[in-house]
Image (cartoon, rainbow, N blue to C red):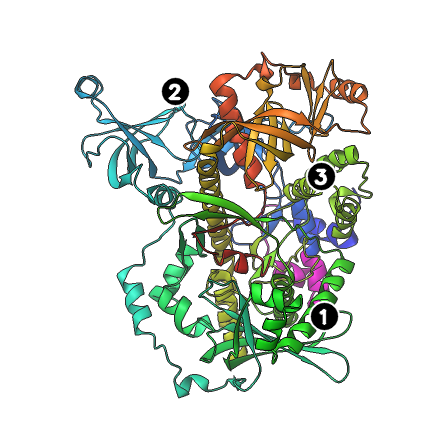
Amino acid sequence: MNLSKIELRILDFLQKSPEKAYSSQELAQALNYQGTKNYKKLIKALAFLERINQLQLTKQGHFKLVNNKSTVEGLYRANDKGYGFISYDEQESDLFVPKGKNGGAMDGDRVIARILRTVDPTTGKGSEAEIIEILERKANQVVGEFFAYDQDQRKRTGYLGYVKPQGAFNEHVQVFIDDQGIRPIDHMICIVKISEYPSPNQPNRMVGLVAKEIGHRDEPGVDILSILFQFNIPHVFPESVLEEAAAVSQEIDQKDLKGREDLRSELIMTIDGADAKDLDDAISLTKLSNGHYLLGVHIADVSHYVRENSPLDREAYERGTSVYLTDRVVPMLPQRLSNGICSLHPHEDRLCLSCQMEIDQKGHVVKHRLFKSVINSSYRMTYDAVNQILTGDTHLRTQYEEIVPMLEEMTDLHHILVKMRQERGALDFDAPEAQVIVDESGHPLDIELRQRQTGERLIESFMLAANETVARHYLSKQFPFIYRIHEQPDASKMDRFAEFLTTFGLVLRGDTAKIRPKALQTALNKIKDQPYEQAVSTMMLRSMQQAKYSEQPLGHYGLAAEDYTHFTSPIRRYPDLIVHRLVSNYLDHQPSQKERDRWEDKLPGIAIHSSQMERRAVEAERETDALKKAEFMVDKVGETYWGTVSSVTSFGIFVALENTVEGLVKLTSLTDDYYQYNPQHLLLIGERTHKIYRIGQKVQVEVASVSVEDREIDFILLDAQPVEGLDPTALIKASRKKGKPKGKADASSTSKMTGSKARRSRHSERKGHKNKQNKSFVIKQGRKHKKSSKRHRSS
């Protein structure tokens, strides 16, 4: 691989002191790459060298040469089959840890592993490792259902019974319960404090005592509450936090207006979901005489009320984000703030941070201002009302005649911004949102789809514009800041995706290590409106890096944005609150060197923690989503549906129904042939019939069985639309040449996996399959939940 001049200079400099780590600022000074333009080039070069495993980033956010050793330190992610993966470098593929090689490690433990095998470039077979040391245990407790022993069993074993833990544990794991803690009744959901962890010799055995009873498994709401405890999500505010929130005035004092621009006479509105109560963003728009647009994005000034290191601030930091589950929202801030003084209710004075942008006809921000303001929103609009106005509803257009012209101009500007983003290569993964409707006891009644329309999309466009503008503003000043970053995709994952695309007649051209978003956008455009569009889009998304927070301005790949941050949701995201705090401070005064140093020390830790809390929230939301979808399908056994193949594995075919419910067609149920698994193209190919099953294929299935406990749904395949344009014989030969005969499976063998083993493997794959999708599912309780109105406002 050819390196650029700056990349070679960086490596040459670091090789002089291979054990020393340098900050980006130190490297900029040493290599004379100072100034905004040069600094950005340096940052991109550092990011690229880290991605190709030439550099590593320390916990302090400094760069050093990679020390190629046979052991690595990383985070172990277990699953319910007994094997797992180690994440040790975000730019490298995870290390596979086979069953029996985890050294007694549990999900989330920090470990040292010995690399047993590196990636085979000819077959694509991944790296493999064994855990040799556990550095830090993540969990000191588990959540699960208690199964009581009778008197004879208690006397024989010395235990009250055992708990089957929720989460990434295989079905054989049991936590035996000492009699020193609480003595729960049978089928009670409990929190168990671990006293003995798994060992290499007894990987499925733990000992603990019951520290808390959550509730009986059949009580309404206990299933969701147990998920909160499972992911250790705080859901009760400490008394000190509630007391501080109660002391916050719900009225604006005259002294609060000092240094603020008065926008109370301007026509400003909010647009949110019908049930939203935390209205943290408002917008205004004026068409200028030069044809430009003056867009105002006004965000609730939460940092004015949540002061640094206060009880409110510390609790918000710990939570990291609001969490949206089926029958409840776990807010980051108490409702007295989020639904009260920080919510931009109509006809009430509210404090804001405003980003005013002059945007030309090509969608470029030619001028901007950031300032503190006070607003008085004129209208509280809903997405539905705005969409109806824009599609010509005469009654609503009359009712809201004052703002109809502004809404139409907003639509025009939105289209200009969309075109601008498309031209630079931004990717639009527009998946349908699933809303699970539940009754008052939490039982799912229905699953509905909601497509985002113009009202939702124009708000998203305006929030994206504000986030980019704020990031660009403070990068130009080189002030310490926190960014939302999405890095270049991993080359090996892109290689596999490019190979997968060939089955659809698509070719990704160029170096996959440096592939630009525009090339991926072109591929998406070529499959627009095809039946496999959503499936291919999802596969592309799985090939991407995870977006995260960083103090380094590494840009946002998916948005094709050079600079990006999260500024627009300080009520529900802690990084946005930090951005507001920084903006507010920087508007008040130029930061001193002491203040710069303080923030440069703090921001890396805040970024890492916030990214972790975001992933925790997403995992909890997905777990809830899977739970309620399985519960919804319990009484649908025997019913038939058409769906789309969403994933193909060596043990079966995952099928997604139109309502986004997903289940597995086990390979054991395909009794008409021996099926060869082609991992390069994600295909199953019948050796005799030459039938092909691939991602994006339309199939008809029958619901065979549902396990709410395991969040699993099994389908039986009834019919499939034939796949055209592929040569099954050539594909089978190609798989064999690449050393892939182990993928071969039939009704009796299923690649040596049958019964519970195949089910566990399927469950593990299902979790990995789901966790790689960056979809936002919308879940509501008998009414429209405002989750959707917030999730898509910024990426």
User: Furthest residue to the front?
Assistant: 395
**Reading the chain from its start, which is encountered first: label 1 or label 2?**
2
Q: Tell me where residue 555 appears, x and y as whole percent.
A: 66, 58
Q: CA distance from mark 1 to mark 3?
A: 31 Å
Q: Is 34 part of what is drawn in magenta?
A: yes
**Quadrant of the image containing the N terminus:** top right
Who's the residue at 70% across and 58% down the image? 42
Farthest residue, direction top: 748
Secondary structure of the residue carrying tag 1 is helix
Magenta-tinted stretch:
17-43
Q: Which residue is mark 2?
A: 201
The residue closer to the viewer here, 782 or 125, is 782
SS at circle 3: loop
What amino acid is at disc 3?
Tyr
Q: Quadrant of residue 54?
A: top right
Where does label 1 land, which residue?
412
Indicate the position of residue 695 as horizontal and vertical percent values: 68, 33
Residue nearest the viewer, comparing 758 with 404: 404
The answer to whether residue 722 is above or below residue 392 is: above
Disc 1 versus disc 2: nearer the observer: 1
C-alpha span from label 1 to label 2: 66 Å
Residue at point 58%, 61% (across, down): 793
Q: Which residue is mark 3?
A: 532
Q: x, y percentage for residue 323?
A: 44, 53
Choose the circle earlier in sequence order: 1 or 3: 1
Determine whether the residue tagged by mark 2 lies in a helix, strand or loop. Answer: loop
Crowding at dot 1, Cα within 10 Å, few <14 / some 14-19 / many 20+, comes out as some
In the image, taking residue 746 as reference, residue 788 lies left or right, namely left
